[in-house]
Amino acid sequence: PYMLSSGYPNCVGEYPFEVNEDGTISPTKNPESVIGTGPYPLVLVARNSPNRFILKHGKELREEKKLAKVGHFPSGQSGLPLELISHPGFGITSQFHTPLNFGAYRLNAMGMDTVDGALRATYDGRIISKADDGAVFTLLSNKVNEVGSPIFLWRANNRTTTRWKGAINDFVINEEGSISPMHV
């Protein structure tokens, strides 16, 4: 087998991989695992796309918008699971067990995985927030609001920044349960 590595000797993140005889690639320390696709990333799609997510509890989340501002702090409520009726058996999930910490903010990629890992969320009519830690849906891209723009969970060091008004954190839960950016 061939050895691939990061090229940074003694780096904490150095993990050598092998190209196996069958063409798969696996970590040398765990040959039973191979590289493949995992949870699907969450991105903006066209409003009429067959790939759009439709929430099972979209109506209930919309009705929750009577809540005070959500986001940044845990809501103190259990929230509703972001289970999908558009993709039965699946839900909206975070991609990393622990958010990436960039000092002034924490960021987590979002995607679709089995419903048992679905995030629980609250909504106040503008912000969709992860109930247990206050992270909010956000668009972070050079081409915000365009098809293909990724959606992340974001939590800054202060509430004003986390709830950044009139911008990339504002979403609408549509009547049928899909989610759209508020400002297009």
Image: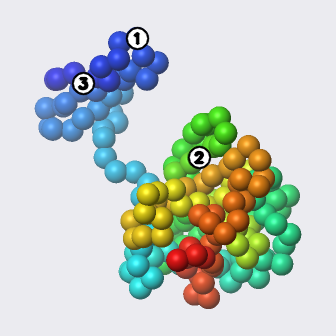
Left or right relative to 134: residue 51: left
| Picture layout, residue 128 above or below residue 86 | above
Lower sequence index among marks 3 and 2: 3
Element under label 2? strand
Q: Residue at x 34, y 51 (%)?
A: 37
Q: Which residue is drawn at 54% across and 44% down?
A: 96
Are circles 3 and 1 on residues that touch, CB within 8 Å?
Answer: no
| Picture layout, residue 106 above or below residue 45 | above
For label 2, the crowd category at 10 Å Cα-Cα, with few meaning under 14, some 14 to 19 and many 20 or more, is: many
Element under label 1? loop
Lower sequence index among marks 1 and 2: 1
Element under label 3? strand
Q: Residue at x 32, y 28 (%)?
A: 27
**Type of the residue with mark 1:** Asn
Q: Distance between the residues labelled 1 and 2?
A: 27 Å
Are circles 1 and 2 on residues that touch, CB within 8 Å?
Answer: no
For label 3, the crowd category at 10 Å Cα-Cα, with few meaning under 14, some 14 to 19 and many 20 or more, is: some
Name the residue carrying label 3. 4
**Type of the residue with mark 3:** Leu
The circle on residue 134 is none
Left or right relative to 62: residue 98: left
**Rendered-image quadrant of the N terminus:** top left
The single residue placed furthest to the top in the displayed view is 10
Q: Where, by quadrant of the figure, is residue 65 drawn?
A: bottom right
Q: How far apart are marks 3 and 1 (CA)?
A: 15 Å
Name the residue carrying label 1. 10
| Picture layout, residue 112 above or below residue 123 | above
For label 1, the crowd category at 10 Å Cα-Cα, with few meaning under 14, some 14 to 19 and many 20 or more, is: few
| Picture layout, residue 37 above or below residue 50 | above
Lower sequence index among marks 3 and 1: 3
Left or right relative to 98: residue 13: left
Name the residue carrying label 2. 107
